[in-house]
Amino acid sequence: MALTVGSKAPDFKSKDQDGKEVLLSDYKGKKVVLYFYPRDMTPGCTAEACSLRDNYKALQKAGYEILGISTDDEKSHKKFIAKESLPFRLLVDPDKTVHNKFGAWVEKSMYGRKYMGTARITYIINEKGIIAEVIEKVDTKNHAEQILGGTTPKPVTKKPVKKVAKKIQAKPVKKAVRKKK
């Protein structure tokens, strides 16, 4: 069961992509965005991470520290951070301890098949360690706007601009004229 607004965020110990120990209590006095996501380098998780990356300065200006967490390992997180130029820490939770504390390890269903997996959920934790907001319906492409309440400026796109192919105009085909014999 997910935690609710007004609940004390449970403290936890985890490691980041560099193997450095992270305690939630280390962030006391700061606002924390703790977002749970299923897998590194999948389309939805990449869109979510890039929304946070592209709006990172606005999030910092609003006083937020960003922590992403999944069951992936340090090596996967490092690769994801390098590929997408992510400026925030990603935490590892292979034994799902933190997932279970926050109710993010849930039963899912796809094509009638039930399985356990990570719920895409974000907790906004205030300076006192209290959950100020829970975002259960994450809009992966606009996640930063959800956190900031729609006050973010439009980010500068870091994706390469697609070249528009020139339309080729077909020339009329002349009919072959057969000579009579």
Image (tube, helix red, strand yellow):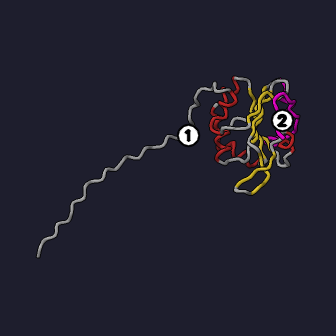
The secondary structure that dominates the magenta segment is loop
Marked residue nearer the N-terminal end (2 or 1): 2
Label annotation for residue 159:
1
Q: Helix, strand, or loop for circle 2?
A: loop
Q: Amino acid at mark 2?
A: Leu
| Residue at (71, 54) in percent of width and height | 110
**Mark 1 neighbour class, 10 Å CA radius: few under 14, some 14 to 19, many 20 or more:** few
x and y, in percent, of residue 26 in the image: 85, 30
Q: What is the quadrant of residue 100 in the picture?
A: top right
Q: Which residue occupies the extreme bottom position in the image?
A: 181
x and y, in percent, of residue 30 in the image: 80, 25
| Residue at (36, 47) in percent of width and height | 167
Q: Which residues are magenta?
A: 1-29
Label annotation for residue 3:
2
Q: Amino acid at mark 1?
A: Lys
Q: Is residue 64 in sight in this rendering?
A: yes
Q: Helix, strand, or loop for circle 1?
A: loop
Kindly check if marks 2 and 1 are in contact, taking CB atoms under 8 A apart as contact: no
| Mark in the foreground, 2 or 1 | 2
